[in-house]
Image: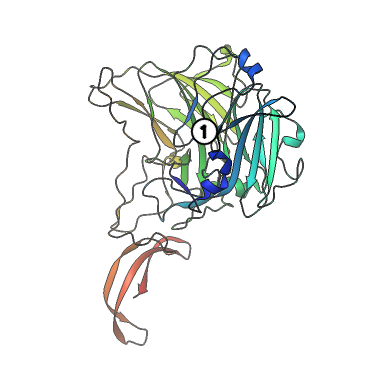
Amino acid sequence: MKQVSLIFFSLLFAHPCLAEEGWTARLEICDPDIRSEIQTLPTPVTMLDGRTLEHKCVKTAEGKFIKLFQLTAEEILTTFYSDFEPGPAYGWGYNGSTPGPVIEAFEGERVRIEVINRLPEPTSVHWHGLELPNRMDGAAPHTQDPILPGGTFTYEFELKQYGTYMYHAHMHQHKQLALGLMGFFIIHPKLAIMPQVDHDILLFLQMWAIPPHSRIPDAMAMGDEFNFFTINGRTAPGTSPIVVNPGEEIRVRIASLNEMPHPIHLHGHTFKIVAEGAERHNLLAQPSANTVVVTAGQTAEIEFTAAEYTGDKSKPDVWMLHCHLPHHVTNNMHVPPVPGEPMAHEMAGMMTTVIIQPKESAPQDPPTSPTPPSHPHRGHGDHDHAMGPIMGRYTGSIELSNGRKFLASLDLFKVQEDGEWRKLKGVLT
């Protein structure tokens, strides 16, 4: 996920202790008593276009071992895909990204999460689906005072469950969730699930309503106003693929806090729905499917065996994995193209691919998700310009209402006016 903080060195100064000795993102168990109970470490999770949150093992004065995390809620800029205009979109995220980094821990561990608020308004963090003390639930103002701008609140609790969970802001939710304050919370079981999978992949689904040529999402949008649909903060054709080998076992964990359900469909495979919202289903309660519906506030886990390679060994097999609502596999479908300037909407939005490498072939760089036809401009101009990308220059005469004419040169921009999505506007130069 190509995301940058609003302030150039914010990650250095916002999280100073991450540079100290002991911080790591590797999969480990801090408490030796719990470590002695775990015979087999699971496959670490992988968030495509994302990362795992660093932690530090801390021993308290009382002799308890705690896994310490730091989360900073802050303003960010995020790029959905390389041709997104008018440039990186404004949002709110954790530690420089939306979704925020993955919190990964083990059943039975005690975690301490220090939340720093660098937003322009109060916030709090809710640990979605976790069983914990009421005062740690993060539902301000009911269970705690809001975390004021510049303030810090420390959450601490024992992990009594395992599975796929989420964390997210729980103040002014329509606004703060719409701007991106959310992330995965993965808890591995003490007793490893066998047989182990070869890949454990995370996909966080988000929807965005961004007015044309604006960088700021409309936090009050509902229904068909959403025009960008992302997986881990990226839209196709910018999403990273799931690259596997034939016959490998794959687990995909999916999370959503959207206002709409997303029927996630995988081509060419039948999978098992092994968990929805909490702990793993009993073996007899794991239905076979090729589509799973992930609703607001829900997580789901699916598992499947990567299909045998069926190609000609010159290129990998590519299987689509996408939301099956047609509008959700588009980018900015509401915007009609300017005459003479093609805009492709297909093979975009909430979509990635499962790429199966050829057997007995030399390693090769995996392709990205299918790329739609280009959306060219003769000259993009300055993406910071409030009126959007430049179309070109007009040099000629202008006739006034009184009939007088004069020579003029104009830069033509695409703009939104009077509720219309795309018009041309001339700026006298």
Q: Residue at x 34, y 63 (%)?
A: 390
Q: Residues within 10 Å of mark 1 (few under 14, many from 20)?
A: many
x, y percentage for residue 261? Answer: 55, 36
Taking the image as shown, residue 411 lies to the left or right of residue 13, namely left
Is residue 100 in sight in this rendering?
no
Q: Amino acid at mark 1?
A: Thr
Q: How is the image coloured?
A: rainbow
Q: Which residue is mark 1?
A: 52
Q: Reply above or below: 383 against 241.
A: below
In which quadrant of the rendered image does the C terminus lie?
bottom left
Q: Residue at x 52, y 50 (%)?
A: 10
Q: Reply above or below: 16 against 335.
A: above
x, y percentage for residue 416? Answer: 44, 62
Q: Nearer the viewer, residue 341 or 280?
A: 280
Q: Reply above or below: 76 against 419.
A: above
x, y percentage for residue 275? Answer: 57, 22
- How many numbered circles does the render carry? 1
Tag 1, which secondary structure?
loop
x, y percentage for residue 248? Answer: 40, 17
In which quadrant of the rendered image does the N terminus lie?
top left
Taking the image as shown, residue 127 lies to the left or right of residue 2, namely right
Is residue 330 in sight in this rendering?
yes
Q: Nearer the viewer, residue 75 or 410?
A: 75
Taking the image as shown, residue 216 lies to the left or right of residue 127, namely left
